[in-house]
Amino acid sequence: MAFEKRHPHHPEKHSPFVHPPVHQKTPTPWEGRKPEPPQAAPIPETPTKSEESPGLLSSLWSGAKNLGQKAYHGLTSWNFEGRDARNGPALPEETIKQDPAWRQMGAAETIYHDNHHGTPERKYVKENPNSFLGLGGQEAVFDGDTGQTMERGPYQATYNYVNPAKGGIKDLSLEGIGRNLGHFALDVVPYWFGGTVRGDEGTTFGQRVLGPEKYEKASDAWQGAKGFVSDKASAAGKKLSAGWDTVSGWFGGKDEEQQRTEQQAE
Amino acid sequence: MSTIRSGLSRWVVSVLALCGCNLSDETVYLHTPTEEVHDGLSLSKSQLAPFRVDDVVATVVVRSRHSNNQNVFFVWIAPYATSKKKVSVRQAVLQSAGGAVRHSFPKELSAVTDRDEGKGRWSASLLLGEIPEAEMPKLVSGGVAQLSFEWKVGDEGTFQPLRMDISPKKITRWATH
């Protein structure tokens, strides 16, 4: 993968995506609908019925909403809090470098942890023999510019419930296929839909699927294509317009002077 | 039913296409006969006999690392045993098949197999040294790089020579998370 088109490092800006501020962020499909912020309402002179005692339906709806939120949190905790707990505390890179059990991953395997600023980030993976069937593994990600552990956020290390096959995507052994499929289903797809961190991802599905670099290239290509089509359409429109004027002239269309005369008469 | 199937196949094709956008090739360096020991291969397998002394199996690990702002390869000897044992290594040399490129690691190193690998297996790691990234292709230019060293198990054991052939393997990586 080429890294020549990278942005210089901006310490204050950690993402190549246009991150909306956290309080304005668009909810991801897994986050559900958040309650509307309270709005200032004029104080009524006499108490309304709903203030005196909430209606039965209102109470039921509120209870159902709370239950739904709790259920949603419980159902997705394996993907957020569960991964954090299993990954354990972040180790310094110097410690990881000295341990042969950690494998440094290649460029393609690091794109979802790469902030696309400065030097590429470095990602390490380690097998966890004590995980379910020994399939899982810890991750560590380090900022390419500072060498520090990637801070909590979209690019932080995430525990793998199934580590990908050591032999890559072309590992066609039974274990290799199982590992790649398992990693895709349990680690990659949940990231595409839910992001890395609950509530502060700030990225879209497309950005997460393509990764920062590919997403930017795709956006550039899309803008270029849109501009090209727009220019062509405009040129075609002008030609059509000119052609129409000519044709209407042949069939006795009104010339400008005639139109002006008619407007004055009106 | 056919609508679901066509939708599913479209989705699968899209996913494969997206994965295809994010592939990269990488070369790893392995000692094939002992590589599966790291994945849980039984230490009593007959194929490991040439690399076993006193129930300890010697394996080699070559891993890419970032050191002093450049990529290098760290070379370890990783002994595996079913109990905690002291292993010593000395006079290690990594050279190309013809001997044209040569890296020596003369320092004697010792470690105890005290890292729990699960399933009653214990391991240790002895870091021989690092090889610049650009040197590895030269070392395996003849097909393999030869790692030779002397090793012994326990304090009373005698050093025995061992040679391991390290070969390159090209791997296609995909966008994992």
Image (cartoon, coloured by chain):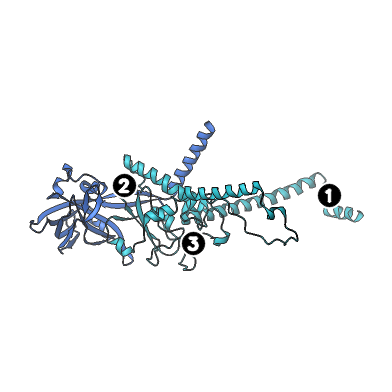
**Residue drawn at point x = 11 percent, y = 54 percent:** B161
Question: Please, is residue A134 above or below residue A116 in the view?
Answer: above
Secondary element at tag 2 = helix
**Residue drawn at point x = 65 percent, y = 47 percent:** A56
Q: Amino acid at mark 3?
A: Ser
Taking B103 as reference, is A169 left or right? Answer: right
In the rendered image of the structure, the colour used to display chain B is blue
Taking A256 as reference, is A205 left or right? Answer: left
Residue B142 visible in rendering: no
Q: Which disc number belongs to residue A44?
A: none
Residue to which mark 1 is pinned:
A254
- The N terminus of chain A lies in which quarter of the figure? bottom left
Secondary element at tag 3 = loop
CA gap between label 1 and label 3 equals 59 Å
In the rendered image of the structure, the colour used to display chain A is cyan
Residue B105 visible in rendering: yes
Residue A165: image location, x then y, percent: 34, 46
* Label located before the other in sequence (1 or 3): 3
Tell which subunit mark 1 falls on: A
Q: How packed is label 3: few (under 14 Cα within 10 Å), some, or many (20 or more)?
A: some
CA gap between label 2 and label 3 equals 34 Å
Tell which subunit mark 3 falls on: A
Q: Amino acid at mark 1?
A: Lys
Residue to which mark 2 is pinned:
A134
In the picture as drawn, the residue positioned furthest to the top comes out as B1
Residue A233: image location, x then y, percent: 65, 50
Residue B4: image location, x then y, percent: 52, 34
